[in-house]
Image: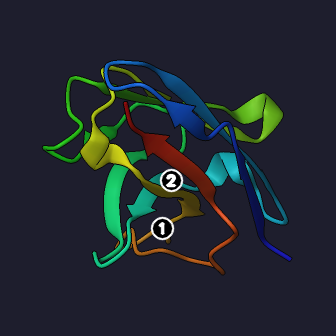
Amino acid sequence: QVQHVESGGGLVQPGGSLRLSCVASGFTFSTYGMTWYRQSPGKERELVARISSNGGGIYYSGSVKGRFIISRDNAKNTLYLQMNSLKPEDTAVYYCMRVDLGLLRPLGYWGQGTQVTVSA
């Protein structure tokens, strides 16, 4: 079955950095676009970033553009999110998810995610 295993979250000071990783399995990783979503208490799950199957097409939400970098290593079935200049409002559970090949909608079950807490 399709699995996404996120790691790398933690507690960090405002202005700090974290690097999230997602190891995917159960599908041909290199065929699919991949995304990072996040959700904080009381808020809707939101798309943070998306990367095309070969890494050539990248999208960032306006709130993270210029601060976060999404990347992938298809040989390792791994997706990354480098998070810089972190702000308290970045606090959330971060999820990795593949997207379908047509409408780029989330395709699979949400995993446990990894908690990112930005606090002084």
- Give percent across and percent down for residue 13: 42, 25
Residue 52: x percent and y percent? 45, 44
Q: Between 58 and 30, which is closer to the camera in this rendering?
A: 58
Q: Nearer the viewer, residue 119 or 49?
A: 119
**Compared with residue 78, is residue 67 higher up or lower down, i.e. above or below?**
above
Is residue 110 something that shows in the picture?
yes
Amino acid type, residue under disc 1 in the picture? Leu
Helix, strand or loop under label 2: loop
Residue drawn at x 81%, y 33% is: 76
**Residue sitting nearer the eye, 19 or 51:** 19
Say which element carries label 1: loop
Is the Cβ of the residue at disc 2 closer than 8 Å to that at disc 1?
yes
Where residue 105 sits in the image (x, y, percent)? 41, 75
User: Is residue 81 at all visible to an observer of this figure?
Assistant: no
Q: In the image, which disc is placed on residue 33? A: 2
Number of the label disc, if any, that sits on residue 101: 1
Residue positioned 71% across, 34% down in the render: 74
Q: Position of residue 40 (x, y in %)?
A: 38, 66
